[in-house]
Image (cartoon, grey):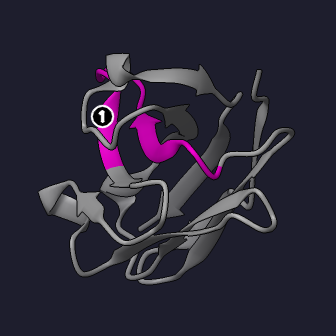
């Protein structure tokens, strides 16, 4: 069983940066990890994913070049560095753990409770 807790969200102006963290209660070294987001009136959306070792990553097109996913298996923590934030990045951000790196939310077994990111224009 893995429990995930996100942190690092907040209010930031457009062009600013935030770093989200996802701390796991158990070992996540054998899991792929993903970040998803949910904005009001929209469906859950893939943001980024990383394989178990950190050697392979994937991003949604709209965040490529601005967001970076990384992990520290020794600390059981995954990060999402978000730069050049835009108002359209406003959403609740969730981290998730699964057996394979995927852009599909249903491939992930464990989910955190989410952290709010609000980008003002």
Is residue 32 or residue 96 the one in the foreground? 32
Q: Residue at x 13, y 60 (%)?
A: 61
Dot 1 lies on which element? strand
- List x then y, in percent, for residue 21: 70, 60
Looking at the image, residue 16 sits to the left or right of residue 106; the answer is right
Q: Which residue is mark 1?
A: 45
Q: Residue at x 21, y 71 (%)?
A: 64
| In the depicted structure, whether residue 28 falls above or below residue 9 | above
Q: Quadrant of the N terminus?
A: top right
Q: Is residue 41 magenta?
A: yes
Q: Is residue 111 magenta?
A: no
| In the depicted structure, whether residue 26 falls above or below residue 3 | below
Is residue 102 or residue 35 the one in the foreground? 102
Q: Residue furthest front?
A: 30
Is residue 77 or residue 55 the one in the foreground? 55
Q: Residue at x 48, y 54 (%)?
A: 52
Looking at the image, residue 26 sits to the left or right of residue 43; the answer is right
Q: How many marks?
A: 1
State the image quarter where residue 26 is shown.
top right
Is residue 5 or residue 2 the one in the foreground? 2
State the image quarter where residue 18 is shown.
bottom right
Q: Quadrant of the C terminus?
A: bottom left
- List x then y, in percent, for residue 108: 45, 25
- List x then y, in percent, for residue 86: 35, 67
The stretch of residues the image draws in magenta is: 29-47
- List x then y, in percent, for residue 70: 51, 71
Give the class, few, some or many, for how many residues have Cα within 10 Å of label 1's Cα (few <14, many ≥20).
some
């Amino acid at each position: 069983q893995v429990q995930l807790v996100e942190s690092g969200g907040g209010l930031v102006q457009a062009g600013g940066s935030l770093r989200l963290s996802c701390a796991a209660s158990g070992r996540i070294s054998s899991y792929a990890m993903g970040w998803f987001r949910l904005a009001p009136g929209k469906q859950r959306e893939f943001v980024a994913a990383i394989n178990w070792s950190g050697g392979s990553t994937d991003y949604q097109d709209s965040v490529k070049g601005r967001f970076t996913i990384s992990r520290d298996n020794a600390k059981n923590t995954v990060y999402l560095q978000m730069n050049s934030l835009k108002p359209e990045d406003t959403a609740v951000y969730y981290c998730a753990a699964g057996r394979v790196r995927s852009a599909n939310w249903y491939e992930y077994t464990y989910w955190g409770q989410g952290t709010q990111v609000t980008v003002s224009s």
